[in-house]
Image: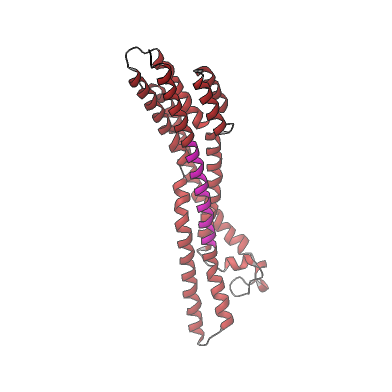
Amino acid sequence: MANAPTKPASPVKKESSTSSGLFATLTIPICIVVAILIYIFILGDPSHFADGDIEKGTTNDIFGQFHRGGKLVPVIMSYLLMVIVFSIERFVVIGKASGTGNVDAFVTRVQKALNANNIDAANVECDKQKGSVANVVKSGLKKYREMEVDDNLTIDQKSLAIQKDIEEATALEMPMLEQNLTIIATLVSIGTLTGLLGTVFGMIKAFGELAAAGATNQTALSASISEALVNTALGISTSALSIIMYNVFTSKIDKLTYAIDETGFSIVQSFAASHKDK
């Protein structure tokens, strides 16, 4: 009986999950291709090097320095693009899930309606707010109405059925909010590691060239080390942005989860209080 309100929502959530998965599948290769094109045609433009010599000419600006970082530079740049794109996507999705108004204000209005035993007013607030929190609350209110006319269960059983319905509705909404966060979390680690790997390769190449020259050239060594450290700078920047975005999104999701739990508890308590003598 408690499963009835949540069944119609399942195809919608499945479709949302599929769309999000398709978005991730397309975004990753596109970011890689764009990063490679930027590396070749923008960073690798001859104007960034003395005499237009990409291989041996000194760099004129930061674009040339990034290009000299080596073949791992476009890889790390693709990570950075992924963080930016997935962050924008999560902002849009979580923004829609939050609804059209302030979540805390919505919870307060629903609680006031419940305290006044005005379920219709609470439903109206859900229709105005929309979003994941409103969807879960509306599902709980629908179950509330069903339990009012059900004479086969005790008050405790009815309250448990409402609580179960809210939990099931929450279980359908939350995965949509958390999708693609694992990608951002993964980029936190691999961004730095790839940057360090690029630096190691650059240092190996730099010292190999010095050894082949047969003499210590401090200018050449300094230039080679500077180019090698470009990978570390890019990797750390990518990881830092990933950490910030991940924490921002998890904080927003926790806020929505708390709002759902708080309102769900209010619905159950309101039902139990208004029907305890029946």
Measured along the vertical axis of the image, is residue 150 above or below residue 133? above
Instruction: Determine the image quadrant of residue 127.
Output: top right
Rendered image quadrant of residue 54: bottom right
Residue at the limit of the structure toward the front, as seen here: 277
Is 92 displayed left or right of 10 in the figure? right
Up-down relation of residue 40 to residue 51 (above or below): above
Q: Is residue 102 above or below residue 73?
A: above
Q: Position of residue 7 (x, y in %)?
A: 40, 25
If the image is split into quadrants, where does the C terminus sit?
Answer: top left
Residue 227: name its quadrant: bottom right
Q: Is residue 185 above or below residue 219?
A: above
Choose between 258 and 71: the one closer to the eye: 258
The N terminus appears in which quarter of the rendering?
top left
Q: At x 35% / y 18%, what residue is drawn?
A: 155
Which residues are drawn in magenta? 234-256
From the top left corner, tell me how far across and down residue 2 is, in percent: 36, 22
